Image (cartoon, rainbow, N blue to C red):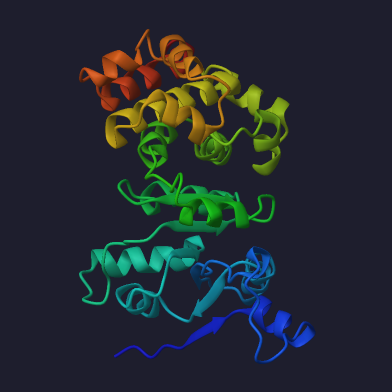
């Protein structure tokens, strides 16, 4: 039997009540004073106490935070319907995956969006392909470089909810083709390719210089970092079309592209002439990924 404790925290509401008390017996009917929509409930399961503080500082203004002391507590909270999104780190999520694979009765497939908030370092990124499983709506946020709040908003948004991503599948194929010195950078590049971040910034998040990243790619027989990023963006579009049945216009809006024609150009240039029409007619993601892997490391066999 597992013991656990749940701490539900709404710091912002408490602060507002203490410094701005409202008059009793009155209720305004003006639109600006209407009750706001319910705050999302965010379950937080992390190992380090200082991480809880950082998460609270970023999210408490718009979410109800439920700090859970164990993975079993998370399963209970999700089953009770009291969780909208989960924020965790690699260590805590790995323990849940171990429990799930062991067939523990309290562990169930995740039914709410997942955000893994952790550092870009080898122990973390090497674990991600197994932890960010396909068919789960999940996102990796780089601590402390990347803000956490936008990821939570995306996860609970009603207009463009977080889709389950191609990133785990791409990582499982690409990382074995690269030397270990590139694993962190390639992981961050794949995970963040569709966010609008530049290659230089992602290299810095990976704790290497952009020049070092390009040199390591060239030494391994890979193409440039920019081509890797553009190829992943093209694969992301194929995934959304094939797995989610999204149109080019939906992808354009969700990924912040200026025109839907950008998607066609990306696919044709980096996936051997593939088009959205071909995907609609049955061209699958697996074939596109095969082509991409061969193109990205096309020089590796000659360099050996």
Q: Quadrant of the C terminus?
A: top left
The percent coordinates of residue 19 (x first, y second) are: 79, 84
Classify residue 95 as left or right of residue 180.
left
Task: Please name the residue shown 65% across and 37% down the image.
Answer: 202
The residue positioned 36% from the left and 32% from the top of the image is 240
Question: Residue at the spot x=65%, y=91% of the render?
Answer: 25
Q: Looking at the picture, tell me which residue is in the foreground, 248 or 92.
A: 248
Q: Is residue 183 above or below residue 232?
A: below
In the image, taking residue 144 as reference, residue 43 lies left or right, namely: left
Q: Position of residue 125 (x, y in %)?
A: 51, 48
Picture quadrant of residue 29: bottom right
Up-down relation of residue 81 to residue 218 (above or below): below
Name the residue at 39% across, 54% down. 131
The location of residue 7, given as percent across then percent down, is 52, 85
Q: Residue furthest right?
A: 19
Residue 177 visible:
no
Q: Nearer the viewer, residue 282 or 10?
A: 10
Q: Nearer the viewer, residue 137 or 179?
A: 137
Q: Residue 144 in the image: x percent, y percent?
A: 68, 56
To which quarter of the image does residue 207 belong? top right
Question: With respect to residue 163, does 215 lie above or below?
Answer: above
Image quadrant occupied by the N terminus: bottom left
> What is the number of callouts on the image?
0
Q: In this rendering, does residue 36 appear at all? A: yes
């Amino acid at each position: 039997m597992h013991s656990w404790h749940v701490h539900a925290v709404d710091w912002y509401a408490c602060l507002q009540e203490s410094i701005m008390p409202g008059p009793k017996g009155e209720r305004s009917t003006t639109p600006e004073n209407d009750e706001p929509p319910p705050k999302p409930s965010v379950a937080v399961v992390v190992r380090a106490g200082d991480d809880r503080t950082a998460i609270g500082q970023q999210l408490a203004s718009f979410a109800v935070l439920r700090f859970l002391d164990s993975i079993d507590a998370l399963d209970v909270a999700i089953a009770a319907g009291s969780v909208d999104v989960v924020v965790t780190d690699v260590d805590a999520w790995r323990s849940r995956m171990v429990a799930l694979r062991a067939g523990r009765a309290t562990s169930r497939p995740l039914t709410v969006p997942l955000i893994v908030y952790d550092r870009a370092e080898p122990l973390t990124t090497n674990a991600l392909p197994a932890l960010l499983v396909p068919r789960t709506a999940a996102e990796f946020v780089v601590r402390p470089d990347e803000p956490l709040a936008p990821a939570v908003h995306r996860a609970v948004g009603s207009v463009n909810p977080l889709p389950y991503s191609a990133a785990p599948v791409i990582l499982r194929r690409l990382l074995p083709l690269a030397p270990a010195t590139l694993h962190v950078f390639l992981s961050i590049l794949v995970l963040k390719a569709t966010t609008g971040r530049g290659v230089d910034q992602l290299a810095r998040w990976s704790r290497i210089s952009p020049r070092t990243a390009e040199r390591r790619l060239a030494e391994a027989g890979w193409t440039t970092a920019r081509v890797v990023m553009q190829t992943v963006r093209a694969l992301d579009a194929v995934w959304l079309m094939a797995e989610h049945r999204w149109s080019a216009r939906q992808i354009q809006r969700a990924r912040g592209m200026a025109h839907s024609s950008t998607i066609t150009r990306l696919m044709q240039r980096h996936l051997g002439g593939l088009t959205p029409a071909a995907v609609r007619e049955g061209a699958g993601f697996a074939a596109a990924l095969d082509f991409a892997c061969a193109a990205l490391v096309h020089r590796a066999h000659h360099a050996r």
